[in-house]
Image (tube, rainbow, N blue to C red):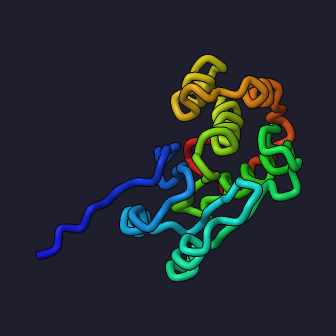
Amino acid sequence: MSSQHFIPPVNFGMIEEDLYRSGQPNELNFPFLEKLGLKTIAWLALEEPNQRFLDFIDDQGIQLHHLGVVSSVNAWDPITEEAVLEALDLILNPANYPMMIMCNLGRHRTGTIVGCLRKLQKWNLTSIFEEYRRYAGPKVRLLNEQFIELFDTDLVTIPANKPKWI
């Protein structure tokens, strides 16, 4: 009898039902991810995911959306408004679920997307920043918090067939 271990990726969390966040997984995390039955991954890092992960995505028939590639050359810059709107467009389409949002460590770019989603859900800023900081740890980026605070939710098109939690 084999005892399979299910190890979530770094900074894994559930955002809403069938909507998850994390950093880039490694092979130890693949059995855990298989259990989620992911249909879509929104990849927010500037660089491509590693080859083993790309192979896993391919094997599982998961659709990969590489967003934010055209953002700045400086990895410290906040994610672009365009990438956030593109990610929210994917997130607000229930046909993409189960779905995971991820970047290298699941901190800053992922946290910014989740923060903007929370703003769309009408969370107060204190709660949004508390969630962002929980995942960012000691590496909080004030520019990301400022981006979330100034993000204009009126730019987001809410589809008719939207998730029930929006």
Q: Is residue 47 left or right of residue 107?
A: right
Q: Nearer the viewer, residue 26 or 109?
A: 26
Q: Residue 19: where, in percent of width, then height?
A: 53, 52
Q: Nearer the viewer, residue 116 or 132?
A: 132
- Spot the residue most to the top: 126
Residue in the image at 16% along x and 74% along y: 2
Residue in the image at 50% along x and 59% along y: 25
Q: Residue 113: where, in percent of width, then height?
A: 69, 42
Residue 106 lies, with reference to residue 138, above or below; the image says: below
**Does the image show residue 133?**
yes
Residue in the image at 64% along x and 65% along y: 49
**Residue 80 falls in which quadrant of the image?**
top right
**Residue 110 falls in which quadrant of the image?**
top right
Residue 24 lies, with reference to residue 52, above or below; the image says: above
**Does the image show residue 95?**
no
Q: Residue 36: where, in percent of width, then height?
A: 42, 63
Q: Quadrant of the N terminus?
A: bottom left
Q: Residue 115: where, in percent of width, then height?
A: 66, 34
Residue 3 lies, with reference to residue 15, above or below; the image says: below
Residue in the image at 70% along x and 58% along y: 90
Q: Quadrant of the C terminus?
A: top right
- Spot the residue most to the left: 1
Residue 126 lies, with reference to residue 78, above or below; the image says: above
Q: How many marks?
A: 0
